[in-house]
Amino acid sequence: MTIEAIKNAITALPVEERHSLVSWLNELEYDAWDKQMVQDFSPGGRGMTLVDKVKREIAEG
């Protein structure tokens, strides 16, 4: 199925079903965002350098 076919199918949905789809997609994106944040700020994650820098700055006053 192509993106264009998906778009056409979505526009053909009744409003209530389209709202339900939007809610589901938003939840899917939020879950992916949350998982990425956990991964980034876990030991070895790419955000840990920032955490380490902030901790150093706090310790230095």
Image (cartoon, rainbow, N blue to C red):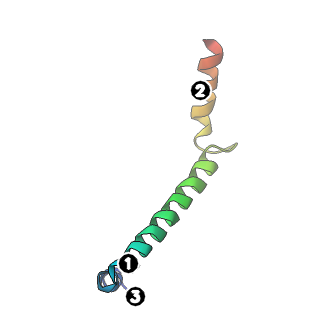
Closer to the N terminus: mark 3 or mark 1?
A: 3
Identify the secondary structure beneath mark 2: helix
Q: Element type at marker 1?
A: helix
Badge 1 amino acid = Glu
Q: Which mark is residue 57?
A: none
Quarter in which the C terminus is drawn? top right
Nearest to the eye among marks 3 and 1: give it.
1
User: Is 38 or 9 nearer to us in this picture?
Assistant: 9
Find the distance from the CA under tag 3 to the CA under tag 1. Answer: 23 Å
Q: Position of residue 46 (x, y in %)?
A: 59, 43
> Could you tell me if the residues under marks 2 and 3 are in contact, i.e. CB atoms within 8 Å?
no
Examine the rendered structure and indicate whether residue 13 appears above or below residue 54: below
Q: Which residue is mark 2?
A: 53
In the rendered image, residue 14, in percent from the top left (x then y), is placed at 33, 83
**What's the mark number on residue 1?**
3
Q: What residue sits 63% from the left and 21% below the top? A: 56
The amino acid type of the residue labelled 3 equals Met
Q: Earlier in the sequence, mark 2 or mark 1?
A: 1
Res 16 label: 1
